[in-house]
Amino acid sequence: FEFRPTKSHVRVTFKDGEWGEPETVKDPYVNLHIGATALHYGQSCFEGLKAFAHKDDNVYIFRPDENAKRMQSSCERTMMPFLSGDKFVEAVNEAVRDNIEYVPPYGSGGALYIRPLLFGSGARIGLQPADEYTLLIMVIPVGDYYKGGLASPVDGLLIEDFDRAAPRGVGHVKVAGNYAADLLPNMLSKKKGYPIGLYLDAQTQTKIEEFSTSNFVGINKEENKYVTPISASVLPSITNKSLMTIAKDEGMTVEQRDIKIEEMNSFDEVLACGTAVVVTPVGSITRFNAEGEATKYEFGTKPQDVGETTRRLYDRVRAIQNGEEEDTYGWNYKVV
């Protein structure tokens, strides 16, 4: 999951109170004013979605309308203009169409990752919104995040010396600064041997919020429950939303609610979900106290194995993305 050069990106500029027309640009560099609000005040947000080649030789984008809604939410919170939903999807379509040869072929397990990025490009030194904004839509071919499609469960670390987002802050929107704040805790967790970190709520430090870049899901097999946190500080994951829909249709009870730390003992499976990886199975979460003593929450009787429910839900959503299962939900948008 790394940057790879492609043919072009799509660029749209907001100036003089209105959006211009989308244009395809081959130059991967941006000429930016030194007073741009994105540089000084972090007025920037982005999205992530994917396009997949199907057996019928067409390419389909997965749920771009949901990304449009989420980017609109980010724009409203950071006082940036938003390209209307239809126009947003059209611009994404154009970025994929102009780079169609970079879409990994059907059956390869790969996809074309799409990254819309919106930022304040107008100059302001006083704290205020910019008068000019730039929307870029870049694309990158990617393979399976994990070889074979679904990794063995990873060990996670409960992060208690950093907060991901403050109550009534910007944790619920996809602004760039949220990810900069996670760089240090993420690196420290990995140095300790934990590839993924789990944050608690900043206010009480008693409830689960989300992983560094993914939503938290707990599976209780005995009660046939799919449980995920509800919080104004958690970014609503489109992958999680899709998995919840599938789980409901399979007869599972889906609960979005507060999850106390101690409840992790009741979960048979835990997974982290997001666009890049789709699903990461988590075999354990370790918590260290002030004296450095560890408490380890392990999930299932064989935490080293991918859980049955995790695998089934993963297989279902990937089958829909790849066109191998009928898209009864209308999630796939055909590139034209």
Image (cartoon, helix red, strand yellow):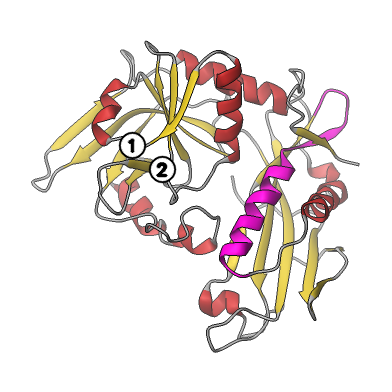
Q: Are marks 2 and 1 in contact (CB under 8 Å)?
A: yes
Q: Position of residue 163 (x, y in %)?
A: 33, 55
Amino acid at pointer 1: Gly
Nearest the camera: 251 or 239? Answer: 251
First reached walking from the N terminus: tag 2 or tag 1: 1
Q: Which residue is mark 2?
A: 211
In the rendered image, the quadrant that contains the C terminus is: top right
Q: Is residue 76 above or below residue 320?
A: below
The quadrant where residue 10 appears = bottom right
Residue ID at (83%, 23%): 55
Q: Position of residue 20 (x, y in %)?
A: 85, 70
Residue ID at (54%, 13%): 251
Q: Can residue 328 be seen at all in this image of the molecule?
A: yes
Q: Which residue is mark 1?
A: 156
Graded by Cα atoms within 10 Å as few (under 14), some (14 to 19) or many (20 or more), the crowding at tag 2 reads many
Residue range highlighted in magenta: 54-79
| Residue 62 belongs to magenta span | yes
